[in-house]
Image: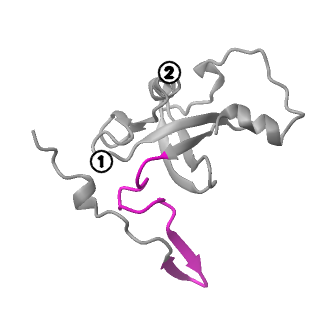
Amino acid sequence: MSAWDSLTYFPNWQIMNKKFSTEQLAFSAEGLIPAIAQDALSGEVLMMAWMNKEAVEETLSKGQVCYWSRSRQSLWRKGESSGQTQKLVAFRYDCDADTILLKVEQQGVACHTGRRSCFYNQVDNGEVAELLPIETAPSVLYKKKEK
């Protein structure tokens, strides 16, 4: 599935002859913008992370999703330590240009807890239910690579 496939579903869309620039995005004062990763085929929301200008540019140029790690203060190439990569299918941003939607092909699990999605907690009548099982133990995901 590519970004062009959307034209099949929305034939009245017009393709704008406008070059994209990261200057069109509304980054926070810290230089960050939230990015939501969504499975391109199922529509399942997988995770939310932050991107900076460099992460956006790398994601668009390489086709592999790259985020900004606030805890490490460095680029975080999804899957670089776990092998659970995200291939970019479509890059969208909202009407205010302050949130990114990444339609991705997820390889493996998206969540560091070993679940398919980070959105596995659901609140019903004040009670929390875990909706998704752990598919891969975090100890397996993040084991030290043998040299």
Task: Give the amino acid type for the residue marked by disc 2 in the picture.
Answer: Ser
- Whether residue 27 is visible, yes or no, is yes
- Give above or below for 69 relative to 63: below
Percent position of residue 119, x then y: 51, 62
Q: Is residue 81 magenta?
A: no
81 horizontally vs 105: left or right: left
Q: Is residue 74 left or right of residue 91?
A: left
Main secondary structure found in the magenta portion: loop
Q: Which residue is mark 2?
A: 61
**Dot placed on the residue nearer the N-terminal end, 1 or 2:** 2
Residue named by callout 1: 82
Q: Secondary structure at mark 2?
A: helix
Callout count: 2
User: In the drawing, what numbered circle is on residue 125?
Assistant: none
121 inside magenta stretch:
yes
Mark 1 residue type: Ser
Q: Specify the farthest residue to the left.
A: 147
Image point (24%, 52%), residue name: 142
Tell me where the magenta segment starts and ends, as one range: 106-129
Q: Quadrant of residue 43?
A: bottom right
Quadrant of the drawing holding the C terminus? top left
Q: How is the image coloured?
A: one colour
Determine the CA span between mark 1 and mark 2: 22 Å
Could you say which is closer to the camera, residue 49 or residue 85?
Answer: 85
Residue 53, given in percent of the width and then of the height, sits at 50, 25
Q: Is residue 97 visible?
A: no
Q: Residues within 10 Å of mark 1 (few under 14, many from 20)?
A: many
